[in-house]
Image (cartoon, grey):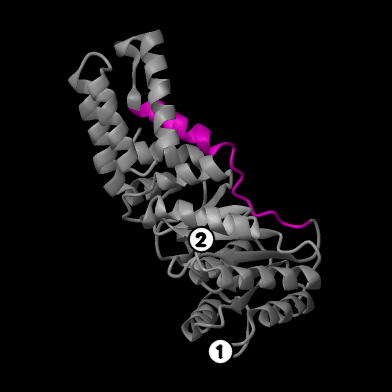
Amino acid sequence: MGLFDKLKAAFTKTTSTLSHEIRRIVTRSPRLTAESLEELEAALLRADLGMATTQQILSAARLAFETQGRSGLDFVEIAAREVEKNLGETNPALRKQASGLTIVSVVGVNGTGKTTTCAKLANLVQQGGEPAVLAACDTFRAAAIEQLKLWGQRLNVPVVAGANQADPASVAHDAIAAAEARQAQWLFVDTAGRLHTKNNLMAELQKVHRVIGKKFPGAPHEVLLVLDGSTGLNALNQAREFHKAVNLTGLVVTKLDGTSKGGAIVAIQKELGVPVKFIGVGEQPEDLQPFNAHEFADALFETR
């Protein structure tokens, strides 16, 4: 199954309401009335596209209607292309260093799938022939360390871990040394889940990054925020606060399978300008896929 088909399946709940509702509204009247525009706005907002993107789509539809008339108006196609435009020319590739080790810090709130994402990212680069190491820096949750070790065994990726409750910055420090000793090309750092509203926890994350930077100047080279796709626009608040604290370089959106909140990705990237790099559409390692804006937009609005 290709990425488009996986996305289309993932967005079943969204598209079964969004695209069908849009088509019902626009085919009911030969022109765009104030009433139909209001209904279209409500439908787009229910998909968590956000007010800015919603207004952008409606403006583009009005312009198309004025220049082409109702016969040339395909609202679903217009909406898909405006969403694609907002997502931009996203390059989902991780920013690999020209030589030596590339360090990727994976951050986010509890329960978004950071540990699993770390393992899947490591598997992805190793499938391309680039050896990786995993750092178990979520030391406050013993289950997270064991979970990462199990993933490491399953995918044949070395895992560096400390004792339960160990200083996560120390584990990161040791993991860098271990990755260099192994001549690995990638180190993925699994950080503890933390509420974006807790200043002390965010300060601790900043400390981990400072220690990484002292041990390996210029690192972390990527800071990926993992978001649960089912939380909708609540994820925007998380992204805002993490971006303030640690300067995000990319987003990974998980649990898109079965969600009705897929449009939140668009609102987040439009506001923050942080690109979506990967999306998760299932439980298997290969279900973490590089993001494709065109296919995402087509799947979200069921254009084909």
| As drawn, 266 above or below 253 | above
Instruction: Locate residue 236, reporting x and y percent.
Output: 47, 51
Task: Mark yes or no: residue 131 visible.
Answer: no
In the displayed structure image, the side of residue 197 where residue 126 appears, left or right: right
Question: What is the tally of numbered marks visible in this picture?
Answer: 2
Q: Residues within 10 Å of mark 2 (few under 14, many from 20)?
A: many
Which quadrant does the C terminus fall into? top left
* Residue closest to the far front: 199
As displayed, is residue 136 above or below residue 130? below
Secondary structure under badge 2? strand
The image shows residue 43 at horizontal and vertical percentages of 28, 36
Mark 1 / mark 2, whichever is N-terminal: 1
Q: What residue is shown at x 53% (from left), y 42% (from top)?
A: 271
Q: Which residue is mark 2?
A: 226
Which type of secondary structure does the marked residue at label 1 adopt?
A: loop
Q: Where does label 1 land, which residue?
A: 164
Instruction: Please tell me in which quadrant of the rendered image residue 31 appears.
Output: top left
| Residue 20 falls in image quadrant | top left
Front-lying residue, 198 or 122: 198
Vertical arrangement, residue 5 with respect to residue 303, above or below: below
Name the amino acid type tagged 2.
Val
In the depicted view, which residue is nearer to us: 243 or 63? 243
Q: Is residue 90 magenta?
A: yes
Q: Nearer the viewer, residue 41 or 162?
A: 41
Tag 1: residue type? Asn
Q: How far across and how far down the image is residue 49, in percent? A: 39, 40
Seen at 31% across and 55% down, the residue is 258
Asked if residue 127 can be seen in this view, the reply is: yes
Q: Say which residue appears at 40% left-offset and 36% top-offset.
A: 51
User: Magenta segment, which residues?
Assistant: 76-97
Provide residue 150's location: percent of width, then percent of height: 50, 81
